[in-house]
Image (cartoon, rainbow, N blue to C red):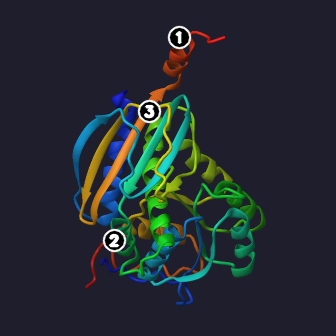
Amino acid sequence: MRMELIQPFINAADAVFAESLQAPTTIADLSMDENTYRRKGVAALIAIKGDIEGRVILDLAPEVAMKVASHLAGGPLPESEQTVRETVCELANMVIGNSVTLLNDQGFRFKVFPPEIHMSEEGLAGTVDTEAMVLCIETPCGEVFLNIAMHYLHRRRREQNAVPALD
Amino acid sequence: MQQFAALLRKDQQPVRYLVVDDSVFARKNLIKMIEQFGGEVAGEAGDGLTAIAEYNRAKPDIVLMDITMPQMEGIEAVERIVRQHPDARIVMVSSVGYQENILAALQKGAKHFVQKPVKPEVLYEILRYVLGDDPHAAGAPVALAGESLS
């Protein structure tokens, strides 16, 4: 796990929530996780492919998403699945947009795929990245979880080349 | 909530905005700020193609344009709008703020760029600046951006 690739996402997430909610946030429970990700609420999964590859999952409870949406709208909003999806999606876009800005300006070139929203009981599909950084951001609206797995492409290619052919 | 002096046209009418973003959530957030600035929403669009049609229909004073959108991205929409309307005032609003994107948008005719999450006081200052060369704009408002008038 390369912290120089992870740090921009942590910084961006912290800044996006602090600025959006106009309130201090705290990063808590930073840990490494090698298990398949277990969704806690509504999750947005964003895949990244290019010089660096991996995926980022932003995960928050529907009640937290509604609180954030109401805060940004300037008043209470009627609870709906559509609002929750929109909120999680836009928050994920902002976090990813801010972090890829930093990485792109460092010279990395990569493609960011649109967020996939997961809110059914089926859970998230596994990815090739088993080792991920997991953290919780405590905000005035509630907890937001971030799960980041990122690596350099050349490292992944070396790993793949090291695997002997099966046939 | 912060209060801002109204940004008005020279004819004392509210500045009319076209808000372009594929996220309804993001549009609502921008519209809330526009209302704080005393503006009026002339139209909304969720992609670049609709933005061009809406621009031609509504002839807004300012366009707030996202970059990453389905069908047609914001930078291409800027190019097409400015080709037809060289005086168009378009401010890019995107979470992706790397230099290539900003330069591309400015080269195609956008007037400014603001990164999401948008801070009202930052957007207000940018709108003041962009409206500054507008013969219809009312000129400098009475309060600085972010300064509470309450």
User: Dot 2 surroundings within 10 Å: few (below 14), some, or many (20 or more)?
Assistant: many
Q: Compare residues A29 and B107 and report the one nearer the observer.
A: A29
Q: Secondary structure at mark 3?
A: strand
List x then y, in percent, for residue A71: 34, 73
Q: Secondary structure at mark 2?
A: helix
Q: Nearer the viewer, mark 1 or mark 2?
A: 1
- Name the residue: 45% across, 72% down: B29
- Residue B47 tag number: none
Q: Is residue B104 above or below residue B63?
A: above
- Name the residue: 49% across, 53% down: A122
Q: Compare residues B93 and A50 and report the one nearer the observer.
A: A50
Q: How many marks?
A: 3
Q: Chain of mark 3?
A: A
List x then y, in percent, for residue B107: 65, 50
Reading the image, the residue beneath label 1 is A162
- Residues at discs 3 and 1 both on one chain: yes
Q: Is residue A4 above or below residue A39?
A: above
Q: Earlier in the sequence, mark 3 or mark 2?
A: 2
Q: CA distance from mark 3 to mark 2?
A: 30 Å
Q: CA distance from mark 3 to mark 1?
A: 20 Å
In this rendering, position of residue A16 left or right of residue A97: left
Reading the image, the residue beneath label 3 is A150
- Name the residue: 43% across, 47% down: A57
Residue at far right of view: B84
Q: Earlier in the sequence, mark 3 or mark 1?
A: 3
**Mark 1 is on which residue type?**
Ala
Reading the image, the residue beneath label 2 is A67
Q: Chain of mark 1?
A: A
